[in-house]
Image (cartoon, rainbow, N blue to C red):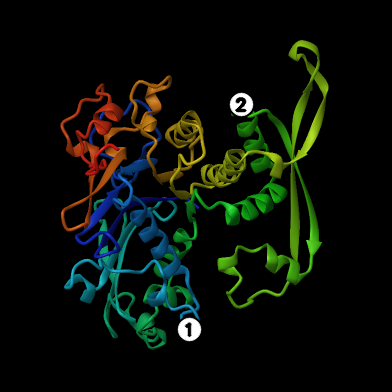
């Protein structure tokens, strides 16, 4: 799968009252050699973006909004789990008018295999989808065409003439609480199915809650030797002392498998009664002799004995290298939590580098690690550009706004981290309490 996220917009969503757009479209800046992807349409798309801001400024809400869109489009069980009841779906609640207005989402995707751009949007109000539309732009030559495949206003649909007869027969299957895109994809509409397939390759991670990701990581490490080799090499070179890892897998019955799930997932009705597996992960460290000389033998430890940061690094590494291998997009909230700043910089550099990122993988993260803003690193060619750094800030009415560093008159050689902490770009807390 080769695709890229171009931009994502929310309006009247959680802390965002007005429209806010996170764009990965590259601005006309000098490129020192990062893995910018050029499309057949002449557009350039960035491999990474970072969102900074004070606590409760809205950083996480951008990522949560995108993760909700992925859930809503992929959800095929609108009876038991209607997308209109998802806990992440909330309008801006601090304004009496916006409480009564729909929540708006819009996403643009580049499809490298089909040489097409998909623009998709929908609005949710109360218990119903009130608007929805899908636009496809294809044919990169002079005959490029833009077509609205379908538009929806409540239960009224209009279709493009080339798609109309086929999709008209399907609109009766679209419930008020369901997205037409999902329904049309299930009935083999090629454009809708393509968007659904693309969004299956966007992964969201809350770096403060890694339990469910570890379960996935163990399964992937067990099944994919190439991926395991990449992760072990990364861990070995991260200066945490681990020389190798090993995994044991054994079957366990359904009750044991269910007990392994996070508590928030245990209330979901059972859809698959097949037995699960128990994974045990071990790390190997070198043994040292007199005066710190490394011996030939190694000692094995259960990975639970490793630090919390090491466990997090391993779990994240699986997802990150999987993305790099397959051209996927990873969203990480609080990337720097529990990791040394040099490690988070290395993670970003993996996506910035055209050597390690050969398939157009993307990383979008939120956090407070200002070292990633620095422009005087050891490998300056892989530093974040001004169009890759975003800020969120709340106004007097407590609504969030988002803007990009490229909007400020700043030279590349400026110390962005220092200027940010000084409040030059806003997006920092303004304390009102006095020192004790």
Q: Is residue 359 above or below residue 62?
A: above
Where residue 20 sits, quadrant-wise, is: bottom left
Q: Residue at x 75, y 58 (%)?
A: 278
Describe residue 66's horizontal placement relative to residue 81 as left or right.
left
Residue ID at (48%, 28%): 342
Q: Which image quarter: residue 411?
A: top left
User: Would residue 213 be seen by someone viewing this image from the given angle?
Assistant: yes
Q: Mark 2 vs mark 1: give the one in front.
A: 2
Residue 354 visible (yes or no): no
Badges 2 and 1: C-beta atoms under 8 Å apart?
no
Residue underneath mark 1: 79
Q: Callout 1: helix, strand or loop?
A: loop
Residue 46 in percent (x, y) is at 35, 41
Q: Is residue 227 left or right of residue 98?
A: right
**Horizontal side of residue 326 vs 390, given as left or right:** right
Badge 1 crowding class, 10 Å Cα cut-off, few under 14, some 14 to 19, many 20 or more, is few
Q: Relative to 286, is 259 above or below?
A: below
Position of 30 relative to 366 (above/below): above
Residue 71 is situated, as x and y percent measured from the top left of the image, at: 45, 66
The residue at which mark 2 appears reads as: 239
């Amino acid at each position: 799968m080769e695709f890229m996220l171009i931009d994502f917009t929310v309006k009247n969503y959680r802390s965002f009252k007005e429209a806010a757009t996170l764009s990965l479209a590259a601005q006309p800046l000098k490129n020192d050699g990062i893995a910018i992807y050029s499309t057949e349409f002449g557009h350039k798309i960035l491999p990474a973006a970072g969102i900074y801001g004070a606590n409760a400024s809205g950083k996480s809400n951008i990522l949560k909004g995108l993760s909700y869109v992925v859930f809503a489009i992929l959800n095929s069980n609108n009876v038991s789990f209607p997308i209109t009841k998802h806990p992440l779906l909330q309008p801006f609640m601090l304004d009496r008018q916006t409480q009564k207005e729909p929540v708006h989402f819009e996403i643009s995707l580049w499809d490298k295999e089909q040489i097409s751009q998909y623009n998709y949007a929908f609005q949710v109000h109360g218990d119903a989808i009130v608007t929805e539309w899908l636009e496809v732009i294809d044919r990169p030559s002079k005959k490029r065409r833009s077509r609205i495949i379908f538009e929806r206003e409540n239960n009224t649909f209009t279709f493009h003439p080339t798609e109309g007869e086929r999709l008209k027969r399907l609109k009766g299957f679209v419930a008020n609480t369901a997205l037409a895109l999902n329904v049309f994809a299930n009935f083999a509409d090629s454009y809708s199915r393509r968007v659904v397939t693309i969004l299956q390759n966007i992964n969201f991670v809350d770096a403060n809650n890694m339990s469910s990701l570890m379960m996935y990581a163990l399964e992937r490490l067990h099944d994919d030797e190439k991926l395991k080799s990449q992760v072990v090499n990364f861990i070995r070179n991260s200066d945490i002392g681990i020389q190798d890892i090993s995994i044991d897998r054994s079957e366990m019955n359904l009750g044991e498998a269910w007990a392994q799930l996070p508590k928030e997932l245990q209330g979901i009705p059972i859809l698959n009664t097949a037995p699960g597996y128990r994974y045990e992960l071990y790390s190997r460290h070198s043994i040292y002799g007199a005066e710190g000389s490394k011996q030939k033998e190694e000692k094995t430890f259960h990975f639970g004995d490793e630090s919390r940061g090491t466990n997090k690094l391993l779990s994240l590494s699986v997802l990150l290298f999987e993305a790099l291998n397959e051209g996927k997009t990873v969203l990480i909230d609080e990337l720097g939590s529990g990791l040394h700043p040099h490690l988070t910089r290395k993670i970003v550099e993996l996506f910035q580098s055209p050597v390690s990122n050969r398939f157009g993988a993307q990383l979008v993260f939120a956090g407070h690690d200002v070292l990633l803003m620095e422009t005087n690193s050891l490998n300056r060619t892989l530093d974040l550009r001004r169009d890759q750094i975003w800020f969120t800030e709340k106004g007097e009415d407590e609504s969030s706004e988002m803007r990009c560093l490229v909007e400020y008159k700043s030279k590349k050689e400026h110390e962005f981290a220092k200027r940010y902490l000084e409040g030059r770009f806003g997006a920092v807390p303004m304390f009102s309490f006095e020192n004790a």
